[in-house]
Amino acid sequence: MAASCSLFHSSSSAAAASLPRHQTSSQFRIPTSAPYPRPRRSPAVITCTSSTLDPAPSSNSVKPRRPADENIRDEARRHRAASAASTFSAKYVPFNAGGPESDESYSLDEIVYRSRSGGLLDVQHDIDALKKFDGAYWRDLFDSRVGKTNWPYGSGVWSKKEWVLPEIHPDDIVSAFEGNSNLFWAERFGKHLVGMDDLWVKHCGISHTGSFKDLGMTVLVSQVNRLRKLNRPIVGVGCASTGDTSAALSAYCASAGIPSIVFLPTNKISMAQLVQPIANGAFVLSIDTDFDGCMKLIREVTSELPIYLANSLNSLRLEGQKTAAIEILQQFDWEVPDWVIVPGGNLGNIYAFYKGFKMCQELGLVDKIPRLVCAQAANANPLYRHFKSGWGTDFKPVKATTTFASAIQIGDPVSIDRAVYALQRSNGIVEEATEEELMDAMALADSTGMFICPHTGVALTALMKLRKSGVIGASDRTVVVSTAHGLKFSQAKIDYHSKAIPEMASRFANPPVEVKADFGSVMDVLMKHLGDKAPK
Ligand SMILES: Cc1ncc(COP(=O)(O)O)c(C=O)c1O
Ligand SMILES: N[C@@H](CCOP(=O)(O)O)C(=O)O
């Protein structure tokens, strides 16, 4: 791309001067490495495109191919050698401790999941250091990294590294170039089913292991990788799971050669989910309880054994998950949608979305945040009940019962406080979906060209209800977050389309028609099906 402004930063010539002799400045590409300590620019001066951040040699030159004996990590290391070290940092603090007077904090290199008082933790970034760069700088930097293979910035998560884990060395990062998931314009669903023109589905499930969990797991496993290199006593990484966290954990651990241990509730996750950790070599325990029971056990076990806890109780996970929110803004050219609807179970993700949006507002990339909706299955709806009680003082866990949205069959969510915080501060809403509603919504969405999971059916039900009541307006730009790939839940779809679900009408079932293998029979069936549509 042609350089569109004259603001080639003076530090680029300084950097060029410090290059090794064999390296010409034309080989040196700035934005793929740590952010350059440029002074904060006033908006009036910012007329640059991403080429300002990426002073490639000349308008029509291409990046020289890396030498054959170099891999992408080596290449990134060579580029980094000439750039400044990160000036950003992050630490654990008690979640919502209220005010800087609280002196409790922990290095991210410590193994700690709870505050002194037993509350949740949060990763707190040095916002003042990040604020030395204005919103336009961050927007340009993030935009310049999308869709590349530069290590590690080609990942949708690590393209925001300075906001995620600023201090981790790129060599320690374990990434599958996750993130950068597509934002699907749900044209037919929007127009025909909810009367909307500006409806979008963020397909976080079109991902390495088929769910949004990859976004958080790349961060957590990278930090574990670092801790193990620092000789911290970690013999493995463990989680309780309804199927997606375990899939992501085992894949990222396998890719880094780190042992993983997963606790799964027997017969409560799909076959496709179960086979993922098995195939990736995790140590799989099938336990005769539900997710909440598994969660309790993994918490007890990780406090006794040097097994690192990978559930979203561990706030590192949310740092990766929040990048999906930043990505949505980026995909809309930094215009803020009116609504974002997220299915909720253990309730880390709804907070992660809030945090991503809020950071973008605080750091000047956008000027507001969307209203958030958390959608729950009626069979596992503790947050919905809490919301309906007007956020009464006492949160009451429930015994979650079987739901087709099996990954959110959770009655005692660990991140309840985070979810309430996010919803209260985003003028948010909680909705619920019955089994019939969520399965019908899934079938309807599929009939418009998607192939969504039942959890996304829960979120779409919430949308339909909020449209019907007029809370969401016809022209409101709305994003429904699809959290897992539909292929993980094909049995639920088979049951629905074969009308095999007791007490469910399966109104939108589309079962195959069995027909004899002769031309006449096939023609009869086709003519009946085509009816008036058939040519006379
Ligand atoms: C597919 C899917 N959707 C939604 C969720 C809910 O996310 P959270 O637990 O962060 O609320 C989960 C996991 O809980 C999930 O696996
Ligand atoms: N749906 C999750 C449940 C656990 O959530 P987590 O975010 O706390 O790990 C799963 O797939 O296991």
Image (tube, grey):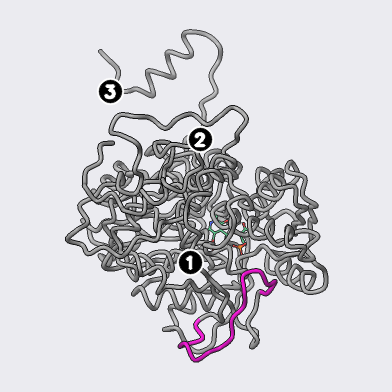
Mark linked to residue 532:
3
Q: Nearer the viewer, residue 7 or 139?
A: 7
- Mark 1 Cβ and ligand 2 under 8 Å apart: no
| Location of mark 1 (residue) | 88
Ligand 1 lies in quarter: bottom right
Q: Quadrant of the C terminus?
A: top left
| Mark 2 or 3, nearer chain start | 2
Left or right side of 108 for 519: left
Magenta stretch bounds:
96-112
The answer to if 247 sits in the magenta stretch is no
Between label 2 and label 3, give the one nearer the viewer: 2
Q: Secondary structure at mark 1?
A: loop
Q: Quadrant of the N terminus?
A: top left
| Location of mark 2 (residue) | 22
Mark 2 to mark 3: distance in Å? 74 Å
* Residue type for callout 3: Asp
The answer to if 104 sits in the magenta stretch is yes
Left or right side of 179 for 214: right
Q: Nearer the viewer, residue 41 or 253?
A: 41
Residue 487: percent from left, percent from top: 56, 40
